[in-house]
Every structure is written in C-alpha cells, then in structure tokens.
Image (spheres, rainbow, N blue to C red):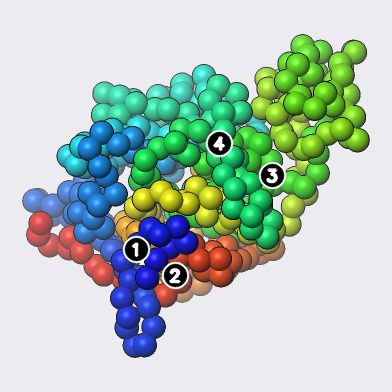
Amino acid sequence: MQLHANISYKAYEKWGEYVSVVYFTDLTTNGSLNLLKKLEVLLEKVEIGRIIKQNNFVAVKLHFGEYGNLAFIRPQYVKVVVDQIKKYGGKPFLTDSNTLYRGHRSNAVDHLLNASLNGFTLDVTGAPVVIADGLRGSDEVKIKISKAYVKEAKIGSAIALADSLVVLTHFKGHEQTGFGGTIKNVGMGSASRAGKLEQHSESKPVVVVQNCIACRMCEKNCPVGAITVVKFANIDYAKCIGCGQCIAMCNYGAMSPEWDESSELLSKKMVEYTYAVLKGKPAVFVSFITDISPDCDCWNTNRPAVAPNIGIAASTDPVALDQACIDLVLRATGKDPFLEVHPKVSWNTQLEYAEEIGLGNRKYELIKVACNVL
C-alpha cells in the first residue's frame, strides 16, 4: 500500500483489509531502559534509516513551544532523533515556520531566541535550528496540488527543500481542530505565514489603525500595489489578493487576518497542506502522548492536562498515527476530553478527510515495543 506520492508506508492485509503499523511504547522504565532508549528503539522499529541517504538534509519538524508554555517535547528526546539521523549519514536541522499571530515566534529573530530559551540549542540537541520560512515568514515554495480547497500550497522553504522529514509531535487538544497531532504539525506548522492565512481565512487582511506607525513596510512589499500609507495604511480590496505578505512584513500588529473559517474547512485545508508537504518527500512520524494539554503549545501558559501521560508512538503513516493517539486517549480517559473542552469542534473531520484524499489509513495495528529489554 502506498501514500499519494509513492511513499510506501508499513501496511499489510489483515482480515481482508489493509492496516497500517503503529509502534507504541508506554512510559514504564527500569535500570537498563530509560525513555530515551525507548525512543531509540521506536526509531529503529519504524526504520528511520530507510528515509535517509548520505549527506541528505533531514528536516526535524517540531514545535519549539511558546515561551512560558512547558508542554512541548523535551530537547533531550530531540537529541536521540538527531543522533539517529547522523548515524545513517544525514544532516539534520530542527525547524518550524513562523506564526501568523504576534508572539515569540512570529519572526525568525524572536523564534530563534524562543527556541534557545526552551532548550533547543546546538549543544543540547546536536543540530542547528533553521526557521523554515525565513526572517519575516515570507520565504516559501509553492507546491501545486490542485485539491478541492487548496490549489497551490505555500510551504516554508527549508521544509520544502529538505530531502526527507522526521516529524516530532506533542499530541494535545486544539481549540480550532479538536486535537493537534501529526497532521496539524505538518500541515499548519510547515506553511509560510501566507499559507497559514490561506488555511485560516478566506477574507483579506484588515488594518488595525491604532497599531500602525506608517513605516510603509506593507506598502513596499505588497506584490500588487494594493496598499497606500498616508497617516496609516489603507488597503484597496479591489486589488488585494489576500496573500498575507503585509501581515508577514508588519512588526507592529497593524495588519491582521480575520479568523472567519469554520473549523471544518480549516481542518480540510490543513489536511491538503499536509498532502503538499509530504508530496514526494520520505518521512517518519513520532508522537509524544504526554502532558496532554487542552490547547495548542502556541499559548504562553498551560491549562491542566485533560488525560494522563500515555506513551510514545511512531509510524510511517501520519493518519494511522493520529488515529492511534486519539484512540489511546479515549481509552485511557473513558471519554472524549477534547470534545468536552472544545464542544463545537470535531476532531474527526481531519482524519476522515485525510483518509479520503489518500494521505494515509485510519485502520492500524498497534504494536507495543521496548517494554522490558533492548
């Protein structure tokens, strides 16, 4: 069985249907087997070496966590992944794209400082950090996919140009998509700021007049000349194409998207962006089902976890991995904690649509590994 872009993932026929393989380890440890060793075993089981060739650039896609949030993946885990990539001759770098909202990760300077403050430094992880979409979030590669909602995805250049991808995801709730798993990490997290705007909103940017200092950066960088600045910026919507470049260029929050997409449409666009990122790119996926916060790690604080710590799972199928993670959470809690905290958002949309467009398989077998000995 194959992904949309001839990337084979582990699947086999069982009971007359194809199922994908998801490897899982719980958090039990002993004197000879700590969690870092368990992760190493998972990476070997998922055959990380299969996607790496000598001197290839390998993007380690993760979320560095907004400063003040402590639910993100520990950098010590990341070092295990980096060491495995180097073992097979790859050149790893840690990466994420800039955020659409203003914060500690909305430009490369602040984003790099934020990553460093949260421990993602070269001496800790063994790999440099490269912000995927550049200084202001405008460095992108356009990937044609011609899907129902997205015709041409705008992907951060460093991710688009990497030879292969290792995706490390903190599995958690999310206020707009129900849960934030591998699909969200790849689809939303790899998009340039313009790509994020496309996923979040059909409307065009608006001017927040009180924040505008008339610096003219938006005017100078608008590709269609839709912006003029006198005392403050003005947008000619007859010319505006909604590309989001003005949002990327503004340091003062004077250009703002309107958050008017339904959660269902947002989820489907996000899935199509994931499709674009993985088009022709070998990848493996690892999810940490720990510190299961109700909201995204983009917040600079934490609300209490909605489920107990469960374990770590890995697969070559992103859809099967997300399905396995949500099933493990539902099983551990005996309820749907994400629906409880975000009752108007259905997480099922992203999984259903991802399988529909051939991104992966919701049917899987969970294989427990690294339980006792190496």
Residue at (82%, 23%) from the top-left corner?
225
**Residue 139 in the image: x percent, y percent?**
56, 28
Is disc 3 in contact with disc 1, using a CB cutoff of under 8 Å? no
Residue 141 is marked as 4
Q: Could you say which quadrant of the image residue 53 lies in?
A: top left
Q: Earlier in the sequence, mark 3 or mark 4?
A: 4
Q: CA distance from mark 3 to mark 4?
A: 14 Å
Residue type at mark 4 is Val
Which disc is residue 9 wearing? 1
- Give x and y (percent) for residue 112: 46, 23
SS of the residue under disc 1? loop
**How many angstroms separate mark 4 from mark 2 (CA)?**
27 Å
The amino acid at mark 1 is Tyr
Q: Which mark is residue 361?
A: 2
N-terminal-most mark, 2 or 3? 3
Give above or below for 88 relative to 273: above
Q: Is residue 59 visible?
A: yes
Q: Are marks 1 and 2 in contact (CB under 8 Å)?
A: yes
The residue carrying pointer 3 sits among few (fewer than 14), some (14 to 19) or many (20 or more) residues within 10 Å by Cα, namely many
